[in-house]
Image (cartoon, helix red, strand yellow):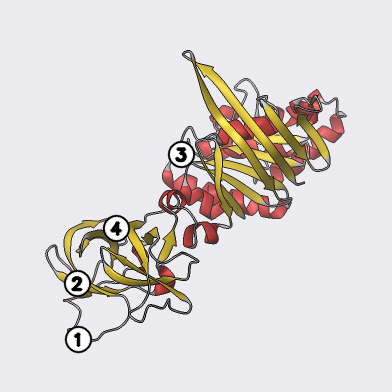
Amino acid sequence: MEIRISGVSKSYLAEGRTIKALDDVNLVIPANRIFTLLGPSGCGKTTLLRCIVGLETPDCGEIRIGDEIVWSKDANISVPPEKRGLGMVFQTYAIWPHMNVFDNVAYPLQVRGAAKDEVARRVAETLRFVQLEGFERRPATKLSGGQQQRVALARALVAAPKVILFDEPLSNLDAKLREETRKELRAFLGKLAITAVYVTHDRVEALALSDQIAVMRAGRIVETGTPQKIYFDADHRFVADFIGRANLVPARIVADEAGRTLAGRTLVDCGLGRIACQKRDLPVGGEATLCIRPEFIHLARGEAPAGPHAENVVSGRIESLVFVGEAYEAEIRAGDALLLARADPDAGLAEGDAVHFALAPDHCLLVAQ
């Protein structure tokens, strides 16, 4: 079920001033995909989710779910949350402590007046799907965090919603359990082939779960794309920086010595020297930001050999090394820039060592300031 959001804005009054939570949001969430709203705290992602589900009322705009308009200021349409055909999993799970697992999951069907045998059949099917078969009579709050999260998912799924929405459902789990549950959730949603809208500020969660990501900032959609597009080929500095560790170096677009631009490449001058980058349609003399991911900086001991050498070879010196388990994080002083790189634990490098590295042009991304 596709969701189409057109011109939606939402403001709040707080301490005598107006806070714009959503600012003219236009977005199409494709059917049967896992779509993530990603951004820092306060960017408007949860407000947008609550507008979709009907827990918040926008100031203007229109929201469609499939072919049905569920909210429109101009048409004076406001479909209540319980009639939008949606399921929702909250950050706190919202498990009822006085109910066992069966009753928690059955509740959405019972309030709809479903027959007793229908309730029993659908609850059993849903608990089997989320791998909680045999837990029906357990007190829900006596389960582990990961199991409670699955109870909340089962309750959202039991009424066969058209769309399921998640508001940071894994944030209360510890790191290892969060990783395991993330894999389970991706598998569950893949089998369901259902439209899922997922809110998080965790970039790893977004990259691992999503078919598409919309990055939000200050109530607006900054950029939308696949995880690979957002991570490797972002258009904006904010997105490149927010979605992962990034070295961001101010740069100026230049021509080669003959006054030409290179076919398939864009040349820049920056704190690292002259660097050939991915092709971007930018004017000579214009400013941009060079983005280099730490994982694409492969360090070699010693300075670069003198004389003509390969494209984008840079010399530097290690200023710091921090052991993070699977690798060392190294800060490299290269020209006027300080770069973050990753080094293998067995590389034998030390602080103060001279190093050099070659940057593949395809891994040198130019983004708007």
Residue that protrudes farthest toward the top in the picture: 16
| Amino acid type at image mark 1 | Gly
Residue that protrudes farthest toward the left in the picture: 352
Mark 1 lies on residue: 307
Q: Percent position (x, y) of residue 84?
A: 78, 32
How crowded is the residue under tag 1: few (<14 C-alpha within 10 Å), some, or many (20+)? few
- Considering the numbered disc 1 on the image, is that residue within a helix, a strand or a loop? loop
**Separation (CA) of disc 2 from disc 4:** 22 Å
Which disc is residue 149 wearing?
none
Label 2 vs 4, first from the N-terminus: 4
Question: In the image shown, does 211 or 139 lie closer to the viewer?
Answer: 211
Would residue 147 be visible to someone looking at this image? yes
Which disc is residue 355 wearing?
2
Disc nearest the viewer among 4 and 3: 3
Q: Percent position (x, y) of residue 292?
A: 37, 63
**Separation (CA) of disc 4 from disc 1:** 37 Å
Mark 3 lies on residue: 40
